[in-house]
Image: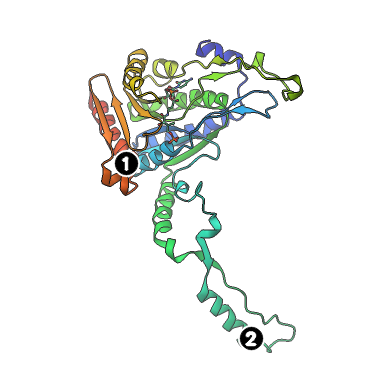
Amino acid sequence: MDAQEYFDTTPAPQGVEDVAQRVREFVEHNQRLSRRVVLVSSGGTTVPLEANTVRFLDNFSAGTRGAASAEHFIASGYGVIFLHRQFSLEPYTRHFTHSKNCFLDFLERDAAAHERAADGGAASSGSSAGHDARPRRGSLRVAERLQAEIAEVFDKYQAARAEHRLLKIDFVTVHDYLFLLRRITMEMSPLGKLGMYYLAAAVSDYFIPQAKMAVHKIQSGDGALTLSLEQVPKIIKPLVQEWAEHGFIVSFKLETDDAMLLPKARKALERYGHQLVIGNMLHTRKHVVHFISADRAEEIRLTPDEVAANFEIETHIISRLVGLHSEWIARE
Ligand code: PMT
């Protein structure tokens, strides 16, 4: 099935036109400021097994790469359209969510406020009959040990909001993702070369077409379940050739077998003719990536010291990409 047939035979999810409107306004705002805009796709897509979905297939991605990259793009001056799996990691909040700590562990009672409340209560006790003289317990505040860390992220988050640099759009299924990706890239096309497409989402390769999908919950009483899945069309093809033909397009290639990574990354580049493939291995993706373009191949690898310091490889990835985007804009 090619992309056109897929879109012709799959019901469009609700809300796509509302998203298009928000993207249009975001693009226009950033264009007025001559800002570059990047679409960052992030997190995994699900594949529903039933139209009234009880069960679905999913994948491993938590959206770490996409959320970190979005933050670094904003720090580099870009406006970011962050197309992400619902409840996956997001820029800024990612530092505090999805950890084993409950958010309540970030808080503590404000002792000084407690004292003030207690004094106030004592001073006023007896002055008015029936007044509740019990001291209030004081307000909550960010725990002292986390003040600096949270303040740093908070300031960046507030600045991104104030400058309208971040537009977040979420998806759940592969269908949401594909329809949104198509619509968003079309709205971004006025950006021309100032638009970048950074496709880090882990997109399902297989799905059940609408016409073959069970409407209601598949009954376990029917015995073992055999699934027949069809291939999701490679959406990068129309993206490169039609929807975002003037933009700078970066796709990712994920493998688990070392021997396949570079050949498959090169093949993707040849097949689709876009600007860059970033190859990564499942188990080393946080420490090493490969940039494959038509005229060069380079490795970005964290040093042992950087690994020990939990340095984010996305810092290096985005800084290199911004440079490549600039070179590409300057060409012609
Ligand atoms: O989220 P993290 O845990 O941080 O992990 C990050 C990551 C490993 C998910 C990310 O770095 C990454 O590699 N993302 C791409 C994963 C993927 O879908 O690889 P692929 O080899 O299946 O697809 C290659 C490219 O084709 C991708 O850019 C994808 O957007 C695109 N694609 C995929 C399927 C499809 N039907 N159409 C597509 O165009």
Instruction: Say which label, 2 or 1, has the lower sequence index.
Output: 2
Asked whether, in this view, residue 146 is left or right of residue 327, the answer is right
State which image quarter holds ligand 1.
top left
Element type where label 2 sits in the image: helix
Q: Which residue is mark 2?
A: 124
Element type where label 1 sits in the image: helix
Which residue reaches farthest right?
221
Q: Which residue is mark 1?
A: 315
Residue at mark 2 to residue at mark 1: CA–CA distance: 56 Å
x and y, in percent, of residue 306 in the image: 29, 45
Q: How was this image coloured?
A: rainbow
Rendered image quadrant of residue 102: bottom right
What quarter of the picture does the C terminus occupy?
top left
Give the amino acid at mark 1: Thr
Which residue reaches farthest bottom?
126
Q: Residue at x 27, y 34 (%)?
A: 300
Answer few, some or many: residues within 10 Å of disc 2's Cα (few below 14, many 20 plus, some between 14 and 19): few
Foreground pick, 320 / 124: 320
Q: Nearer the viewer, mark 2 or mark 1?
A: 1
Q: Residue at x 58, y 78 (%)?
A: 117
The disc placed on residue 48 is: none
Q: Residue at x 31, y 36 (%)?
A: 317
